[in-house]
Image (cartoon, rainbow, N blue to C red):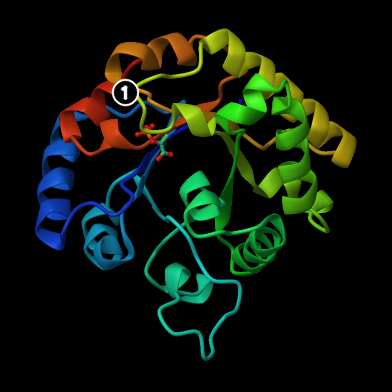
Amino acid sequence: MKKRLISANWKMHKTIGETEEFLRIFLKSVSLKDDREVLICPPFTSLQTASQILKNSEVRLGAQNCHWEKKGAFTGEISPVMLKDLGCDYVIIGHSERRHIFGEEDEVINRKLISALEEGLRPILCVGEKIEDREAGMTEKVVETQLRLGLSRLEDHIDSIDIAYEPVWAIGTGVPATPEDAVNVHRFINEVLDRLNPSRKRETRVLYGGSVKPENAGEFMKREEIEGLLVGGASLDPESFAKIVESF
Ligand code: PEP
């Protein structure tokens, strides 16, 4: 039985002091069960501190992005080697804010995935349609293209990657997808992954992300197709995130 994955994406929030405070309260208040994995993805500047605090806990550490090279003349970038060195197990790749604010394209996302896997990080590949795609009935086409291009040459490694379905119109808007809509896209994602690698072991977890809160997390997690959550805003408060972790 796969462990479900509940992940916090803090984006560009929290200083080192705020990270320490969050983790102190969160570790005290959350009750962790064996059937789920909990992941915190703070900004790069808090990784070292979080790594120290989390090293004797069951909570895993991840980064929100990485470069595709191991080292070199790439001012301002962070490599997967550096993330591994800091104690990260996971890295989020292709988040919609990376795609749509920073212009990351599927080809770059693919290179990042390859590099992260080479360093032994488990990537969470984010996919999802914009509102205009949804209104034009293009959700499946957009998600399939992101999967095919993102996972190009990685067909044999799909089991080492998790996917987050995050409809862009649901991220940070307070308007989540309905669990039914999410389930339909999650089923479709699994069909595409099966087509890319019919002999995969189905170890990939398909997470939902987009305006998840303590009040709606349980509704998503009731559905077996939803194998985890990627939580932005509601993961910034330790008690709110603990409630999401304990919502099922
Ligand atoms: C996210 O950052 O991936 C996200 C889903 O944000 P929010 O939960 O705030 O919608």
Q: Is residue 49 above or below residue 247?
A: below
Residue at image position (71%, 44%) is 146
Q: Amino acid at mark 1?
A: Ile
Q: Position of residue 114 (x, y in %)?
A: 69, 64
Q: Position of residue 195 (x, y in %)?
A: 89, 34
Q: Is residue 197 visible?
A: no
Residue at image position (17%, 53%) is 19
Give the residue pinned by disc 1: 244
Numbered label tally: 1
- Which image quarter has ligand 1? top left
154 left or right of 99? right
| Front-most of residues 67 and 122 | 67
Q: Is residue 18 above or below residue 214?
A: below
Q: Residues within 10 Å of mark 1 (few under 14, many from 20)?
A: many
Residue at image position (45%, 74%) is 78
The picture quadrant where one finds residue 190 is top right
